Structure formats: structure tokens, C-alpha cells
Amino acid sequence: MQWYQEEIRRLVQKPVERPGEQSKVVFYGSSTFTRWPALERCFPRVQAVNLSFGGSTLAACAWFFREVVLPHRPDALVLYAGDNDLGDGRTPEEVVLFYEHLLAAVAATLGAVPVCFVAIKLSPARLYLRGSIEYANDCIRQRVAAHGPPRHYLDLYARMLDGRGQPQPALFEADGLHLSALGYALWRQEIDAQLPLMLAPLA
């Protein structure tokens, strides 16, 4: 995990916002969140805090959770990670285990706060991982359904496909991996609709 140290130092130094009237929601995960322009201003109904770090895996998110996220004591988490694990050669089963490790750390330290896993996206650059992505997503979706709240699952995988079941190129940058402005507009709409469902028990 040494290659993340510069990013982790940046996040650890980030000021911890004092609790306000709005629920504090931490966005945690990989570069899909890290590269999101002005993410913290995209969700005015909550106090959004972006604690993501580029290139992160679910394994890294679990490893650094106590150091990075816990000091902020969030009311809820939105989690996106997993595609880098698969891109590094990890199996879908390992991705699910890393997810469970992270959720166990959340429960042990923050209690029953809502955690929403955003489905791993299928990008044009990683079409070769389609089977692994779908299997990992399906396993996590089933676990969320069996467990129920405070676990949540947001299926943006399907929303990003066209009528032929292929990734929509317009939602991605030229590298075929990271989201375009249109991609982020879609994610903002879908996550903004998900947040009230997560936070309703807290109201």
C-alpha cells in the first residue's frame, strides 16, 4: 500500500468539518470520485466530503478506512471501488471479500450507518473484464438484498449501457476509462436520487 502514501497524507490533512444541520456523507473510493469536478458542491442537500484517492482498490479502501474516513464520523458513505482490483488481476471473490472487510470496519467503528455501494462500471477500456465485473456486482447486490438497510446498492452498471448492452462512449473520456461530463451528470442524477433513500431513517 506504499504507493498511496502521498494521497493518504493529503486526505489525513483535510480539515474535519464540524457537524451541521445536514447529514454528512463521505464519498470514498477510486479516481471516479477523485476526478469528479466539485463533487462536494454537487449534492447541496447533504454535507458531502470527498475522501477518495486515485487508483484505489477496494482492498486499499478497507486498509485505510480508519485512518482516512473514521475521523470525519460520517452519517453515511457512498462507495465506488472494485474495478481497479479486477484490473490488477484480483478475482471477483476477492473483491467481495474486500467489500465485506470494509463493511465490517464501518460497522465496528461507526455502527449502523448507511453504506451505498455503486456498482462497478463497465468501461470501454475494460470490456475484457465484463464477466468478472458482472459477477462481482451480482454477488454484492445479493448480499445487500439479503442484509437490507443500512446496506444499499446503486446499479449504475446497467444505466451506462446502450440498447445493445455496450458502454455508451459519450459517458467516458477519450481514454475509455474515466467519466466524461455527461457521465458525471448521469452519476449526479442517480446518486442524488439515492441519497434520500439512504438517509430517510436518519431524518
Image: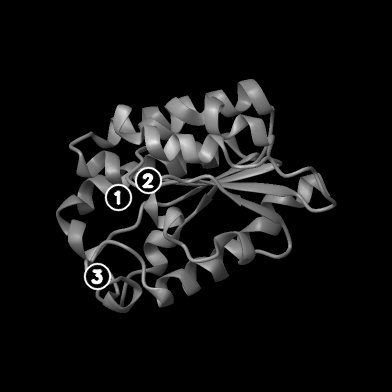
Q: Marks 3 and 1, how far apart in space?
A: 13 Å
Q: Give the position of the N terminus as an image quadrant.
A: top left
Determine if residue 136 is in view: yes
Residue occupying image coordinates x 61% and y 39%: 148
* Neighbourhood count class around disc 1 (C-alpha, 10 Å): few under 14, some 14–19, many 20 upward: some
Q: Would you say the residues marked 1 and 2 are in contact, meaning their CB atoms lie under 8 Å apart?
A: yes
SS label for mark 1: helix
Q: Horizontal and vertical percent for residue 174? A: 23, 72
**Residue 103 appears left or right of 157:** right
Q: Which residue is mark 2?
A: 138
Residue occupying image coordinates x 46% and y 69%: 184
Q: Would you say the residues marked 2 and 3 are in contact, meaning their CB atoms lie under 8 Å apart?
A: no
**Residue 87 appears left or right of 134:** left
Q: Horizontal and vertical percent for residue 157? A: 38, 60
Q: Which residue is mark 3?
A: 166
Q: Horizontal and vertical percent for residue 98? A: 39, 29
SS label for mark 3: loop
Q: Horizontal and vertical percent for residue 58? A: 38, 36
Outermost residue toward the top in this view: 108
Decide which of 148, 33 is in the foreground and name it. 33
SS label for mark 2: helix
* Neighbourhood count class around disc 2 (C-alpha, 10 Å): few under 14, some 14–19, many 20 upward: some
Name the amino acid, label 1.
Glu
Q: Marks 1 and 2, how far apart in space?
A: 6 Å
* Neighbourhood count class around disc 3 (C-alpha, 10 Å): few under 14, some 14–19, many 20 upward: some
Name the amino acid, label 3.
Gln
**Residue 44 appears left or right of 60:** right
Q: Marks 2 and 3, how far apart in space?
A: 18 Å
Residue occupying image coordinates x 59% and y 42%: 14
Q: Nearer the viewer, mark 2 or mark 3?
A: 3
